[in-house]
Amino acid sequence: MIRALALLAVAVAVLGPALAAEPLAPPGAPASAFPRPHRPVAEIVAPRWSSEAERDKAGEFEQVAIGMGIAPGETVADIGAGSGYYAVRLSPRVGPRGRVLAEDVTPSYLSALETRVMPLRNVTVVRGEPHDPRLPPASVDAAILVHMYHEITQPFGLLHNLAAAMRPGGRVGIVDANAIPSRHGTPPALLRCELAAAGYRETGFQPLADGAYLAVFAAPAPDARPRPETIRPCRDDATGR
């Protein structure tokens, strides 16, 4: 027992305190305040999109990081961090003065994330809610949502609450497949419609490998967000018009 406690003390000294995967901020607007999307919502089926080797070979992370303008010293939120593919690669990119908030809502993913990122001092695991990432107000320079937008049960609530966490000039990048939600993708026109309904403005778009894309948006200032009751869902077809 004494030996175990000694080893734990050494681990804490070297790696820092264990990650609790707790929310970092009080809850935002409740899911019930927002309209439901007029489209299917895909089930969460896996913590990763494809193998990490395949993604590295395609240069996915580098393309997204450049497209998002991720820079040293920034705080980046990885919303729906899953297996941690982006979180561990963002860590050296933002550097020791930067911070990565690896957020997810699935308990088994959070547990695996804690283990994977424990040696990384600038990564914090955050337990969010499906409609609310539970991030501190005005704390995030950039947020990425990778191959998970189509799994968000209440996108308008999540976008509304995420906007409050963004610093002025903060940008949100969404990576998804150009496919209908039931096939685990989001047509770009539908994405643009839903983001616009939540007050976001598109600032960039680029295709990625295997039919995926990166869409970048400027988040609205907290006081410029549409009121939840004024948001109108987009049509439930593949175009979003």
Image (cartoon, rainbow, N blue to C red):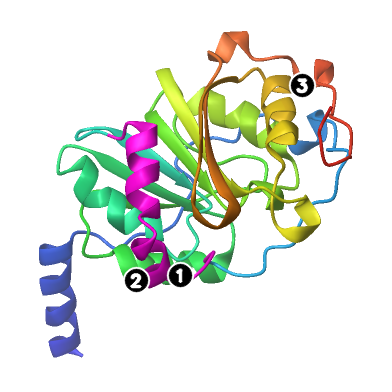
Image quarter of residue 210: bottom right
Tell me whether circle 2 and circle 1 mark residues in contact (CB < 8 Å): yes
Spot occupied by residue 121 in the image (x, y as percentages of width and height): 20, 54
Please give the residue where the numbered disc 1 appears in the rendered image: 111
Q: Which residue is mark 2?
A: 115
Q: Considering depth in this image, is 217 or 1 the residue closer to the camera?
A: 217
Secondary structure beneath dot 3 equals helix
Q: Nearer the viewer, residue 165 or 41?
A: 41
- What's drawn in magenta, residue-wise? 48-70
Give the answer, above or below, for where 201 lies relative to 110.
Answer: above
Which of the two residues, 181 or 45, is positioned nearer the viewer here?
181
Q: Earlier in the sequence, mark 2 or mark 3?
A: 2
Secondary structure under tag 2 reads helix
Look at label 1 and name its amino acid. Answer: Ser
Horizontal arrangement in the rendering, residue 188 relative to residue 174 (left or right): right
Going by the image, does 161 lie left or right of 230?
left
| Residue position marked by numbered label 3 in the rendering | 228
Q: Is residue 211 above or below residue 160?
A: below
Under mark 3, the amino acid is Pro
> In which quadrant of the rendered image does the C terminus lie?
top right
Q: Position of residue 106 (x, y in %)?
A: 59, 63
Residue at x 72%, y 51% (from the top left corner): 179
| Residue visible at 89% across and 39% down in the picture | 236
Q: In the rendered image of this protein, does residue 79 appear above or below residue 210?
A: above
Q: Are marks 2 and 3 in contact (CB under 8 Å)?
A: no
